[in-house]
Amino acid sequence: MLDMKHPLRLESYVCGAWRAGTGSPKPLRDAATGAVVAEIDSTGLDFAETLAYGRAAGAQLRAMKLHDRALMLKALGLRLMEQKDAFHALSLATGATPKDGQIDIEGGIGTLLNYASKARRELPNTRMLTDGVVEPLSKDASFSAQHILSPLRGVAVHINAFNFPIWGMLEKLAPNLLAGMPAIVKPASQTAYLTELMVRRIIETGLLPEGSLQLVCGGVGDLLDHVTGQDVVTFTGSARTGQMLRAHPAIIGNSTRFTMEADSLNACILGPDATSDSPEFDLFIREVVREVTAKAGQKCTAIRRVIIPRAQADAVRAALDAKLGAISVGLPNDPTTRMGALASLDQREDVRRAIAALASEAEIIFGNPQSVQVTTGDPEAGAFLNPVLLYADQPMRAQAIHDVEAFGPVATLMPYDDLGQAAELAALGKGSLVSSLFTNAPDVAEDVVLGLAPFHGRVMIGNRDSAKSSTGHGSPLPMLVHGGPGRAGGGEELGGMRGMHHYMQRTAIQGAPRLLAAVTGRWLDGAEARADTHPFRKSLAKLRIGDQLITEKREITLEDIEHFAGFTGDTFYAHMNEDAARANPFFEGRVAHGYLIVSFAAGLFVQPDPGPVLANYGIDNLRFLTPVYPGDRLGVQLTCKDINPRAEGDYGEVRWDCQVSKADGEVVALYDVLTMVAKTWPA
Ligand code: NDP
């Protein structure tokens, strides 16, 4: 693929410098031609020093606010996207076609960008996060508790797999850097040249604080001996290696967080309603073919087990034969190639061994793993393999087909006799990353999905309605959890902002509200408040948490209720009919509308003149606590709870604690009012 007279000598980026190993390097070969692409070696690196250097760099990341970290990821993603052609050119050497390369390259950079924008939308612009609600621990509001999340003080060590040299790095880095923790990436040797190229480009941008990203090309030597309880180790690869690393004495001894994503025998189930004349049948066939052949089946989410109604076995087999027969295998840069090469000749031998193990229980019904047919390229020098399909007639009694992961273009068909058996077969995989179900029947969806869910991190339902918009079985998405229980490693990655939590410590903080507010930067009931100027007259430059307004009281009359009912059309009986309202177990007569109370509250607290408050963009956590009757007098206590200036833009979000009470102090409604406020006023 690459015209390289001199193979690239890969370097590691540690302790602020690019360093080559001092031992004899191992050659890395182009997957499709066998030519040496690069050489790798990490001998001589001081891993204790590397960890210490990373830990020290954490201070700079932690000093940044969350929105600044998110903007850093955005800028990085945009710069990397500009250079994607260079990554694509090198990606061909991994055996990936340009389409496969998109999953890795654009998919990886897209994950960075997605985290960058989601974080700015969903998270406050702070250095730590609050988690859940304030828990009052005393009747007089003098002792309360709040959970917080703060970044760990160590380094995240990411040990990655060969199949996604870019996405595999970036999907872990995005939540990791956002959380405020530095990282050391150790790519799988086989495809480390592509990761190394991207890390070079990342470091060149100068966008990351120095030390927040280090790279080890080659073995990690004694690195794991030096991890502490503040470090995190993540692993993607084979279950065997993962289990060995998880049992490392330093990881066990220090309770170092260890996240593992390993082999997974993902299933795709055809519902009994999806007969061969249904759109779901065609969608199912298309999905299976795509998942068996994309990245030559080297995806952790690829479909390995195809679970079908016994009555459909012949139809499924015929449809798959026809589609798989049309898959041309050849050089990744040949435009007629539908499927490229496996990552290496060793990997091909592994897959052949796995097929032989599967064939002890299942019959090969399509393809011949020993005979390779290519349209371009050398079938012996390149790690090519045509798709292989097996059929296991009695899958409930078989073992290897639920145990052995052939990490290539290989799947096994398994018929089920009743619907309960379909989910049971999937569960025999002992925990998978993802399974999918193709059905148009709601009862089938309910039965099967509830059967699958405890064994999976993600379940996708495919049918005619989502055919055009579906993101597919095999695509992990930044906003959805990626990981699976049991055999899949028991880990969890991504999942939107949940992904950051692996790099943060959750701590319950207990104390007097005034001191809790100082810790979290968020006002809570019982903390200090001050009422001077109307807080809506204060720009972000002047506004402080605890700034408060206590309004006049306003009486609610029967006329108000009738006017509101007539004006809005809300003539629900509890507001209009005295007898019917009395018959209701909650009311003693006609009551005011909840939305009338909220509207009157706004009328009481608003400051009408043009000022720094730009807009009201919502209400959170609205609860009505007690009914309001004609004659009740209501007042509002509005307190500035949370101030989040945007890192970019001349305004920020302000959250106000709003309590509406009766004259005797009984609280009627509680909610947060959300507003946008200018940073300065006059602007
Ligand atoms: P490995 O488990 O051998 O390697 C995964 C990662 O672990 C690589 O970065 C590897 O580095 C590293 N590693 C290996 N040994 C050690 C060690 N002693 N200490 C620290 N790090 C170590 O998996 P492979 O990449 O070789 O793939 C083998 C099989 O794993 C595949 O055939 C497939 O079945 C499965 N796999 C599953 C994936 C999934 O996501 N479900 C993804 C990829 C593979 P190095 O490359 O330098 O040895």
Image (cartoon, helix red, strand yellow):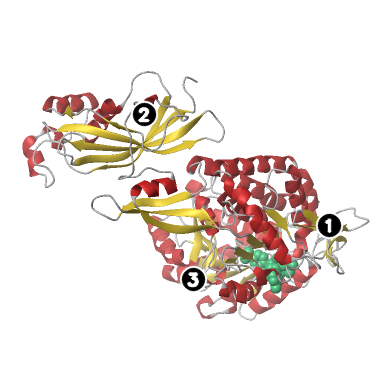
Q: Position of residue 283 (x, y in %)?
A: 55, 53
Label 1 sits on residue? 376
Real-space CA distance between mark 2 and mark 3, rounded to the nearest whole angstrom: 57 Å
Q: Is residue 144 above or below residue 159?
A: above
Who comes first in sequence, dot 3 or dot 1? 1
- Circle 3 SS class: helix
Name the disc covering residue 427, or none.
Answer: 3
Residue 517 percent across, percent down from the top left: 39, 46
Report the mark closest to the observer, 1 or 2. 2
Residue, disc 2: 535
Q: Tell us which disc is closer to us: 2 or 3.
A: 2
113 left or right, relative to 584? right
| Amino acid type indicated by mark 3 | Ala
Question: Residues under labels 3 and 1: Cα distance?
Answer: 40 Å
Residue furthest right in the image = 5
Residue 166 visible in the displayed image: no
Residue most extreme to the left: 579
Specify few, some or many for label 3: CA neighbours under 10 Å numbering under 14, 14-19, or 20 or more.
many
Q: Which quadrant holds the N terminus?
A: bottom right
